[in-house]
Image: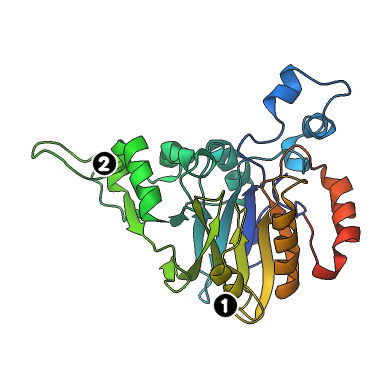
Amino acid sequence: METQDLTQNSIHDAVRSALIFLGTGCSNTVPFGMCLIQPSDPPCHVCYQALSVPPEQNPNYRCNTSLLIDYCQSDEKHSYILIDIGKTFREQVLRWFTFHKIPRVDSIILSHEHADAVLGLDDICAVLPFSSTNNIDPIPIYLSQFTMDSIALRFPYLIKKNLRESQKIRQVAAQLDWNIIEEDCQRPFVASGVKFVPLPVMHGEDYICLGFLFGEKSRVAYISDVSRFPASTEYVISKAGAGQLDLLILDASRKVLSSNFQETSVLLLSSCSLSLSLSLSLYIFFLYDTDNMCLANFVLPVCFHI
């Protein structure tokens, strides 16, 4: 289960902005295949729980990490902004877009070029309107130059370039508008009316992944893949930088991380003026109900919850 409130049939029952967690799992997703085809003794409790009830009622069933921002403007017009489009995108569309009555995607933002963040681009047709004449405004996609170069190699048919005179642009390529953003906290960009501040973090020691700070009435920091925080990013989301940070959504793929990262994460949470913190990229080590209670007891002063 990726969303928390399933009592209503649609988030449109009330006119408001919303965050919809399409996925909160790691790259392998949960349940993990090896836990099912070669079960241990005793079996993996998390993966067993993930199959015990339907996914829409099950917080231990987790697709690739992805966030959908339903931005409701003052005129009650909705814009839908997707952060990351991983390997499980098609399942997320069938399960959560239909459940929440999401009619389209207006913008896409990519945090990095790993498979669990971009391979769903191959299924992007699932949310593109059809036009035989290619006269529909393209969907803007925001990404770093490094991610753009990687996608151009893996999905050349999604890129409009190097066309011969008689060669037609493929329809799907014509409906995508690629926009390069900087890996710099000082270079914000606007997607579908929402201002985003890039938050460069280290995903491994030699790889930069982007998180994002957004929201005016409520300030949200979304950081899906991180092993270390550069000082500039830490400052931007701290009390001294962002001021009141209402929600921090943070990578927590494993319970046992390096002591340095654990210490840095707790210090970061302590330095933020937070209302709530949530965790992402949850691997098979996390049993939802049990670990929620453990985290509440362990780091209650900094409001760290799954």
Task: Name the residue carrying label 2.
Answer: 132
Q: Quadrant of residue 68?
A: bottom right
Quarter of the picture holding the N terminus: top right
Query: Could you tell me how far apart the alpha carbons at marks 2 and 1 are, in whole angstroms?
Result: 39 Å
Answer yes or no: is residue 230 visible: yes
Residue at (62%, 73%) from the top-left corner?
219
On the image, the x and y values in percent for residue 71 come to 54, 66
Locate the C terminus by quadrant. bottom right
Q: How many discs mark residues in the rendered view? A: 2
Q: Nearer the viewer, residue 292 or 81?
A: 292
Q: Is residue 79 left or right of residue 131?
A: right
Q: Residue furthest left?
A: 165
Of the two numbered discs 2 and 1 in the rendering, the one whose residue sits closer to the viewer: 1
Indicate left or right for 294 with 33 as reference. Answer: right
Q: Is residue 17 among the parts visible in the rendering?
A: no
Would residue 159 appear left or right of 241 to someone viewing this image? left
Badge 2 vs badge 1, beta-carbon distance below 8 Å: no
Secondary structure at numbered mark 1? loop
**Residue that label 1 marks:** 216
Q: Position of residue 60 (x, y in %)?
A: 77, 40
Which of the marked residues, 2 or 1, is nearer the chain's N terminus?
A: 2
What x and y, as percent, mark residue 126?
45, 40
Instruction: Give the secondary structure at mark 2.
Output: loop
Figure coloring: rainbow
Quadrant housing residue 8: bottom right
Q: Residues within 10 Å of mark 2 (few under 14, many from 20)?
A: few
Residue 62's label in the rendered image is none
- Please tell me whether residue 118 is drawn above or below residue 249 in the rendered image: above
Q: What residue type is disc 2 on?
A: Ser
Residue at horizontal 53%, vertical 36%? 87
